[in-house]
Amino acid sequence: MENISINLSSYKKKDLENNFLVTNKTEIIVAFSYPLNHEYRQSFISKTGFTFDILVKRIIQKYKNIYEHEKEYGIWGHNFEDLFLENIKFKDGIYYLSIGS
């Protein structure tokens, strides 16, 4: 999953060229690190596995929650509207996000 650019505040499913299956696993872990002071890992569950659209929507929901609890997560430097999902990498059982602004 490379060379993507999705504005988290205005994402719509039609933004995707194709909605492919990322994994058929029903539980995954995603690492959130930018623009947070410390990395935060979140488990997500989906009975049918995760398409790219489902994964992006879960990431967006979590970022909205993070920004609602800004002091708890230690956000620095950017508003939610500034964030773009640029890449997702899978390593050692965890999905790592590349977030730009």
Image (spheres, rainbow, N blue to C red):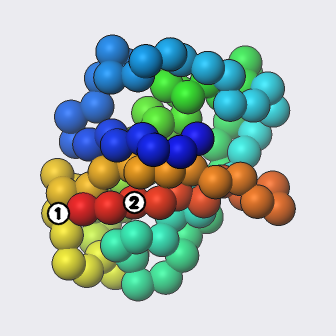
**Residue at x 26% of width, y 43% of height:** 7
| Disc 1 target residue | 79
Tell which of 67 and 91 is nearer to you. Answer: 91
The type of residue carrying mark 2 is: Ile
- The answer to which quarter of the image holds residue 16 is top left
Tell me: residue 31, above or below residue 51. Answer: below
Q: Quadrant of the C terminus?
A: bottom left
**Residue at x 33% of width, y 15% of height:** 14
- The answer to which quarter of the image holds residue 48 is top right
Secondary structure at numbered mark 1: loop
Secondary structure at numbered mark 2: strand
- The answer to which quarter of the image holds residue 26 is top right
Pointer 2 local density, CA inside 10 Å: few below 14, some 14–19, many at least 20: many
Tell which of 56 and 16 is nearer to you. Answer: 16
Q: Position of residue 60 (x, y in %)?
A: 38, 43
**Residue at x 68% of width, y 22% of height:** 21
Direction from residue 17 to residue 26 in the image, left or right: right
Q: Quadrant of the N terminus?
A: top right
Give the distance between the C-alpha atoms of the residues marked 2 and 1, in whole angstroms: 12 Å
- Residue 42 visible, this angle: no
The type of residue carrying mark 1 is: Asn
